[in-house]
């Protein structure tokens, strides 16, 4: 073995004769450093190349061996260095106390050279095995994190691609999809600040809602162009066909899961939002006509976000309303169209809605 590959052993003792003795004993097998004080030992360990093992005397002036061991075990960079006490203190209580500080072994003076060599070799082997496992665990943790990030990226790309399908069909949805995504997050964060919803709307749930929101209009890919792109207000019959986009959207996501042969939890909120965002708190919405808390919370959030954006946006059948007018209309819908709690949350973040609308405004033609 090349000398640079040999383990490094630090011998700490305030007696020069003991340092010379241990150096001569160890030098054929290991690289050896010596320190004549606790302070010097700590400085060496804090340097660029910490030792692989430390033989440590207890009784030294200044910082004694016990204190050196305490400080080593308290430091993240040095806590895994095995420490063997090498001392004249030979009582059982002395050994027990030394081991309680974190030392891996305790050898009393006068030393037996074969015993010292055997124990040093044993603990270096144990340290090498522990280092290997630690490195392996670190690698595995990094690999899990990498693959988790890849899965997350695939999920994000899947949602973005699906949402883009709806966007390409409807020339009014470009900024709408992006704006409603941020509206939903702002609403959920405001609602999460209330005791009633704090446990339900965790940061992880809010992130999932944010990512799922763009799929609320995915069902529009199944609506005929003559209706979806009509340059005037829809007739009652046409509106009945347009209403089918909620069911079409939910069914498209379900079918995608079925083709994969599994339910995908990250799409659960997307299904709720696509199917339920046109429901109303008083039961007068569609497609099911359900009311109150029977409507999933995700859909109740999207209902307000969707209507707010429709109000402030120009449509072929209406001019855009101001932010203030939109806020007034949403207040009028509290308890009828919208969940009262969601409207109350909207009051707290309406300024954020205005900022989002400005940030992702549709280009002026």
Image: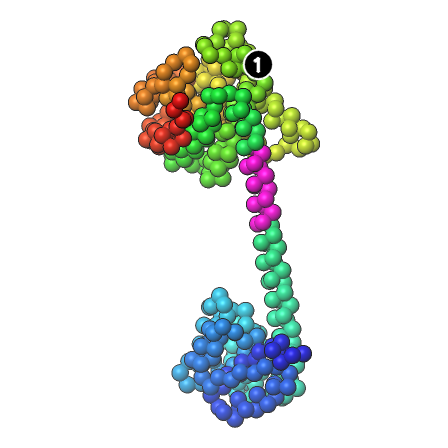
State the colouring used for the structure image.
rainbow
Report how many numbered discs are placed on residues in the image: 1
Residue 121: where, in percent of width, then height?
65, 78
Q: Nearer the viewer, residue 197 or 300?
A: 300
- Residue 228: horizontal and vertical position, in percent? 52, 15
Crowding near the residue tagged with mark 1, few <14, some 14–19, many ≥20 C-alpha atoms within 10 Å: some
Does residue 103 belong to the magenta stretch? no
Image: 121 above or below 348: below
Residue visible at 63% across and 63% down in the picture: 133
Q: Is residue 149 part of the magenta span, yes or no?
A: yes
Place residue 40 in its image quadrant: bottom left
Pick the quarter of the image with the C terminus.
top left
Q: Which region of the structure is painted magenta?
A: 145-159
Observer-nearest of 101 and 150: 150
68 relative position to 124: left or right: left
Residue 103 visible in the displayed image:
no
Residue sitting at the far bottom? 17
User: Which residue sits at x=64%, y=86%?
Assistant: 28
In this picture, residue 21 sits left or right of residue 63: right
Tell me the element at label 1. Answer: loop
Q: Residue furthest left?
A: 324
- The answer to whether residue 193 is left or right of residue 217 is left
Q: Position of residue 46 (x, y in %)?
A: 46, 73
Q: Which residue is label 1 attached to? A: 224
Q: Position of residue 295 (x, y in %)?
A: 49, 22
Q: Residue furthest front?
A: 365
Measuring 59% from the left and 42% from the top, which residue is drawn there? Answer: 151
Q: Is residue 82 visible?
A: yes
Front residue of 289/229: it is 229
Q: Determine the main secondary structure of the stretch shown in magenta.
A: helix
Vertical order, 150 against 285 (above or below): below
Residue shown at the point (56%, 41%) measured from the top left:
153
């Amino acid at each position: 073995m090349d000398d640079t590959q040999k383990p490094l052993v630090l011998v700490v003792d305030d007696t020069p004769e003991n340092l010379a003795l241990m150096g001569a004993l160890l030098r054929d097998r290991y690289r050896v450093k010596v320190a004549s004080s606790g302070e010097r030992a700590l400085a060496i360990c804090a340097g660029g190349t910490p030792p692989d093992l430390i033989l440590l005397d207890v009784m030294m002036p200044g910082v004694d061996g016990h204190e050196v061991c305490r400080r080593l075990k308290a430091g993240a960079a040095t806590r895994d260095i095995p420490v063997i006490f090498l001392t004249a203190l030979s009582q059982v209580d002395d050994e027990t106390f030394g081991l309680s500080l974190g030392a891996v072994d305790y050898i009393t003076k006068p030393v037996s050279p074969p015993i010292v060599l055997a124990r040093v070799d044993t603990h270096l082997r144990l340290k090498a095995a522990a280092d290997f496992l630690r490195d392996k665990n670190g690698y595995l943790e990094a690999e899990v994190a990498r693959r988790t990030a890849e899965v997350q990226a695939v999920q994000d790309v899947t949602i973005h691609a699906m949402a883009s399908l709806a966007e390409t069909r409807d020339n009014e949805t470009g900024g709408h999809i992006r704006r409603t995504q941020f509206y939903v997050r702002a609403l959920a964060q405001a609602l999460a600040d209330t005791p009633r919803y704090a446990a339900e709307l965790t940061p992880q749930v809010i992130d999932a809602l944010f990512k799922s929101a763009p799929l609320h209009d995915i069902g529009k890919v199944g609506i005929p162009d003559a209706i979806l792109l009509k340059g005037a207000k829809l007739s009652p019959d046409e509106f009945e066909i347009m209403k089918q986009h909620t069911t079409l959207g939910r069914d498209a996501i379900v079918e995608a899961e079925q083709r994969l042969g599994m339910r995908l939890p990250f799409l659960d909120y997307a299904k709720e939002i696509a199917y339920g965002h046109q429901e109303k708190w008083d039961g007068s919405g569609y497609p099911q006509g359900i009311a109150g808390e029977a409507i999933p919370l995700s859909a109740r959030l999207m209902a307000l976000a969707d209507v707010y954006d429709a109000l402030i946006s120009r449509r072929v059948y209406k001019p855009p309303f101001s932010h203030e007018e939109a806020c007034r209309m949403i207040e009028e819908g509290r308890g009828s169209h919208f969940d009262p709690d969601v409207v109350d949350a909207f009051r707290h973040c309406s300024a954020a809605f205005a900022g989002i609308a400005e940030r992702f405004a549709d280009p002026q033609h």
